[in-house]
Image: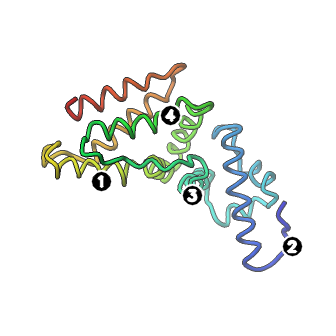
Amino acid sequence: MVNEHRSGPVRSTVAREAILDATARLFHNQGYDRLTIEGIAKEAGVGKQTIYRWWPSRGALIADCLAEGRLIPVDFVVPDTGDLATDVETWLRSVLGILEAPEGGALLRSLVAAATEDAAVGAHLGESLGVEKYLSERLRGGIRDGQLPEEAPVEQLGRAILGAIIVESLGRETHDPDSVVALARYLFGR
């Protein structure tokens, strides 16, 4: 519990950490739909006003948790072995491992739900999975190495693959990661 009667920057740092920790814990335990600012405040031992001082909504709070690696703690770097198709497949299998992990599909579905309320969550989701930085960088390397045409729409390809991952997670009782891998193989000529 955070002591509300403390003063100074220590309280702010301690309260912020408690809020982010409580948010991540509750998000993992109950999902986005059942996550409330009241529940987070109680779990963190702070008042709701403390939360609203830093975050205007639960979506913004989830976006910060995601950006800080509190929800998806893995760094999804795309390897560069010189074979674009193999590198993208390796990255994809790593990302799709989230869906295979216990509660992984529910986590991704909750993040998608949060993204519908706060666009920052969607942006941070792509960043957390390495789409914006690592995948786009690797695709540009594929253009440089002649494995993709010069006019290849790198950002759109990355978003299309992210979209396929998200669609695979939505409304599925069983996941078929191979279908997303097959799409990537088709896109990159394998």
Q: Which label is found at residue 137? A: 1
Compute the Cα span from label 1 to label 3. 21 Å
Label 3, residues with CA under 10 Å away: few <14, some 14-19, many ≥20: some
Q: To which residue does mark 4 refer?
A: 97
Label 4, residues with CA under 10 Å away: few <14, some 14-19, many ≥20: some
Q: Which amino acid, mark 1?
A: Glu
Q: To which residue does mark 2 refer?
A: 5
On screen, residue 11 above or below 190? below
Label 2, residues with CA under 10 Å away: few <14, some 14-19, many ≥20: few
Query: 147 or 114: which is nearer to us?
Result: 147
Q: Which element is circle 2 on?
A: loop
Compute the Cα span from label 2 to label 1. 48 Å
Q: Which of marks 3 and 4 is nearer the N terminus?
A: 3
**Closer to the camera: disc 2 or disc 1?**
1
Q: Which of marks 2 and 3 is nearer the N terminus?
A: 2
Q: To which residue does mark 3 refer?
A: 68
Q: In this view, does 95 lie to the left or right of 37?
A: left
What is the x, y in percent for residue 150?
13, 49
